[in-house]
Amino acid sequence: MLNGKVLSNPNKSDICKMNHAQSNNIICPVITLNEFRKRLNDTGATELLILVDENTRKYCLPVLFKLFPELNEAAVFELPSGEINKTLQYCESVWQFMSARQFSRKTVVINLGGGVLCDMGGLIAALYKRGVVFYNIPTTLLAMVDAALGGKVAVDLMPFKNQIGLFQSAEALVLHPEFLLTLPKDELISGWAEMLKHALISDDAYWLNLIAQNPENIQISLIEKSIAVKANIVKSDPMEQNVRKLLNFGHTVGHAIESYYLTSDSPIKHGHAVALGMLVEAQISHDLGLLSHYELAAIGTNITKLYAFPSDLCEHIKALFELMLNDKKNSGGQVKMVLIEKIGKAVFDQNVNFVVFQKALKLVTEKQAS
Ligand SMILES: NC(=O)c1ccc[n+]([C@@H]2O[C@H](COP(=O)([O-])OP(=O)(O)OC[C@H]3O[C@@H](n4cnc5c(N)ncnc54)[C@H](O)[C@@H]3O)[C@@H](O)[C@H]2O)c1
């Protein structure tokens, strides 16, 4: 039984007039609250729909209403939080809600939440009546530096991550780092993993800067730096034909770990799974002669101090590899990974077989246990 909740349902509202020209650009602008205010004042929207989950309804929606009193009359729909609920069924519950109220193609959707909400809300907006405008207002670190930017919207087809989705950009990403004040520590650490990834694939100086910082006390300049790294890569390859694949470092193994534990009693957060994935993929990079022992050790030290492997991981190596075989980046029945040659330089489309994966996974888990 779906339990998406309707929080308010105003009559058709014309409080905002949005620019409905949907951007073909995959990279949307990152805008300030003031810029968003200007856009709200100029909108031609017939309806406004704010999507939240139970946590962003509690912690972020009151902040948004305070900043933008004109949004008080918008319809609000609460989706349940968590990766396990990033499904087409919940999208359907929102589409039913919108259709029952005759929301038009001039509806504007505002996604107020983390990566799960932005991924799902983006897909909901992109498919409703063949597409309505949406804005992402990310409220987690992970969504600010990664998920809310770059035009990938998707839901999972259990157990496969992001199996059903589109390339569709938000109209803009509205950046308001103050939302992080209520974010739990392990969610900050989760987002931190994507920032480490940005450094590892593109910028050794950024890596040195990051590892000297405290992820619980993040400077806005670092958020902006990570946004810039992602934006630059996506700009040069919006549809992930080549260099955009680099952003998947840590994700081939990471998604398999996240998927495997998704329905368990102890699901693993996306960023934590990516961090563990980066450890394994760095080990593979070393084992295949790409990455030096010295840099592998530096990556290992800095990741293992923040992220821990589930104790039973090595019991599921075959199942994990099976999941990896379904990864979207594969071709020709081969698992393709992003590997790193050195900190700040990565390569994509590297074939990795089961034996190599098994050896690396065993090694990194043993190292962490010792
Ligand atoms: N589209 C992309 O390019 C892309 C890139 C990276 C990750 N992702 C996706 O992002 C998702 C992970 O995103 P996430 O880590 O943001 O997880 P999430 O959206 O599940 O949010 C984490 C938790 O924090 C809560 N929360 C959100 N904001 C809060 C706040 N300000 N205060 C208190 N609690 C708050 C949420 O309710 C949730 O419980 C995954 O599904 C992943 O696949 C997508």
Image (cartoon, rainbow, N blue to C red):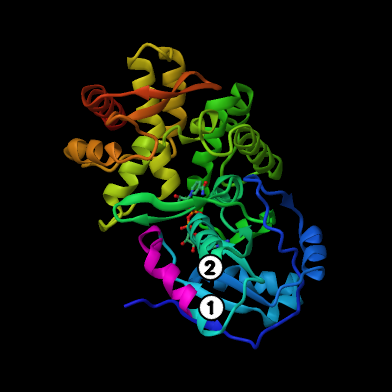
> Looking at the picture, which amino acid does disc 1 mark?
Met
> At 49% from the left edge and 72% from the top edge, which residue is drawn?
54
Residue depicted at x 34% and y 14%:
288
Q: What residue did someone put label 2 on?
A: 128
* Residue type, label 2: Tyr
Report the front residue among 203 and 14: 14
Residue 148 drawn at (x, y percent): 58, 52
Label 1, ligand 1: CB separation under 8 Å? no
Where on the picture, by quarter, is residue 76?
bottom right
Q: Residue at x 50, y 74 (%)?
A: 78
Q: Residue at x 25, y 24 (%)?
A: 353
The boundaries of the magenta stretch are 83-96
Residue 294 seen in the figure: yes
Regarding residue 370, the answer to whether it shows in the image is: no
Location of residue 292 in the rendering, given as x and y in whole percent from the top left corner: 43, 12
> Which residue is denoted by mark 1 in the rendering?
98
Image: 160 above or below 10: above
Mark 1 element type: helix
- 1 or 2: tag closer to the N-terminus: 1
Q: Are marks 1 and 2 in contact (CB under 8 Å)?
A: yes
Is residue 86 inside the magenta stretch? Answer: yes
Determine whether the residue tagged by mark 2 lies in a helix, strand or loop. Answer: helix
The image shows residue 258, relative to residue 182, as above or below, that is above
Work out how far the residue at label 1 is from the one at label 2, CA to CA, in angstroms.
Answer: 9 Å
- Would you say 153 lies left or right of 322 here? right
Give the image location of residue 169, x and y in percent: 61, 52
For label 1, the crowd category at 10 Å Cα-Cα, with few meaning under 14, some 14 to 19 and many 20 or more, is: some
